[in-house]
């Protein structure tokens, strides 16, 4: 009889240990899912804030573009100093918000994940589907594209077909040569 109760107790202990291990594993999974959900939410909040800051970044970029061609030396110095201060503020804002500008160079390959083509030009100096010009900067936040760069890309020029002169064109050409 004693042996039977010992066996029953061992079975109950094994059952409770199994339940404990199962609950322990479920709790670990719950903690991991909660952590991932929290991280995803944090990225969404940061992305939303970054999108709102892009309005300010675009305004700062527009302010820094100035033409000093027709101003006096003092105004040029003042304007340059003002532009440099705006650029510092712009860089600080990007750094604080975690934004990284997407600034492809002329001739870089078009990447539809990071760029949006807003125009096409027939150019021979760049390969097909290469970036010619940036219209508006794009931005990344934690390797996620917040806003793709708007670019103009090159397309191959349409081939010009050479038209062979017809009978009448050849005849007129012969007449003109004889009259000279």
Image (cartoon, grey):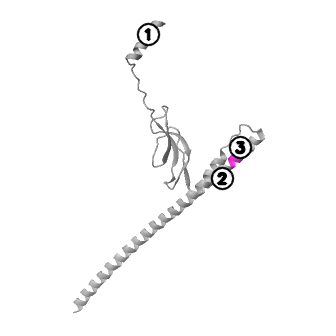
Q: Nearer the viewer, mark 2 or mark 1?
A: 1
Q: How many numbered discs sit on the rendered protein?
A: 3
| For residue 12, above or below residue 58 | below
Q: Secondary structure at mark 3?
A: helix
Query: Alpha-carbon distance for marks 2 and 3?
Result: 14 Å
Question: Quick one: label 2 or label 3, which is nearer the N terminus?
Answer: 3
Q: Nearer the viewer, mark 1 or mark 3?
A: 1
Q: Nearer the viewer, residue 79 or 23?
A: 79
Residue 6 colored in magenta in the image = no
Q: Is residue 136 left or right of residue 160?
A: right
| Residue found at x 41% / y 72% | 30
Q: Secondary structure at mark 1?
A: helix
Mark identifier at residue 161: none
Query: Alpha-carbon distance for marks 1 and 3?
Result: 68 Å
Q: Is residue 6 left or right of residue 34?
A: left
Find residue 89 and report its horizontal and vertical position in percent. 66, 52
Residue 83 colored in magenta in the image = yes
Q: Nearer the viewer, residue 16 or 53?
A: 53
User: Are there few (<14), some (14-19), or many (20+) residues within 10 Å of tag 1?
Assistant: few
The magenta span reads 81-85
Q: According to the image, label 1 marks what residue?
A: 175
Q: Secondary structure at mark 2?
A: helix
Q: Is residue 93 left or right of residue 13?
A: right
| Residue found at x 50% / y 62% | 44
Q: Looking at the magenta stretch, what is its main secondary structure?
A: helix
Q: Nearer the viewer, residue 32 or 37?
A: 37
Question: Quick one: label 2 or label 1, which is nearer the N terminus?
Answer: 2
Which image quarter is the N terminus in? bottom left
Find residue 176 and report its horizontal and vertical position in percent. 46, 10
Find residue 46 and report its horizontal and vertical position in percent. 54, 61
Q: According to the image, label 2 marks what residue?
A: 89
């Amino acid at each position: 009889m004693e042996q039977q109760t010992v066996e029953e107790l061992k079975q109950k202990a094994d059952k409770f240990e199994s339940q404990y291990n199962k609950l322990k594993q479920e709790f670990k999974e719950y903690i991991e899912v909660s952590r991932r959900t929290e991280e995803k939410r944090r990225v969404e909040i940061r992305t939303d804030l970054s999108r709102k800051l892009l309005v300010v970044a675009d305004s700062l970029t527009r302010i820094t573009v100035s033409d000093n061609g027709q101003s006096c030396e003092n105004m040029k110095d003042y304007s340059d100093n003002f532009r440099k201060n705006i650029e510092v503020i712009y860089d600080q804002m990007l750094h604080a918000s975690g934004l990284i500008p997407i600034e492809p160079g002329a001739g870089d390959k078009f990447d539809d994940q990071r760029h949006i083509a807003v125009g096409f030009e027939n150019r021979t100096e760049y390969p097909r589907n290469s970036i010619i010009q940036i219209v508006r900067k794009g931005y990344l936040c934690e390797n996620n594209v917040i806003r793709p760069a708007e670019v103009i890309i090159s397309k191959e020029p349409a081939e010009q077909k050479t038209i062979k002169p017809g009978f009448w064109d050849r005849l007129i050409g012969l007449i003109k040569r004889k009259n000279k």
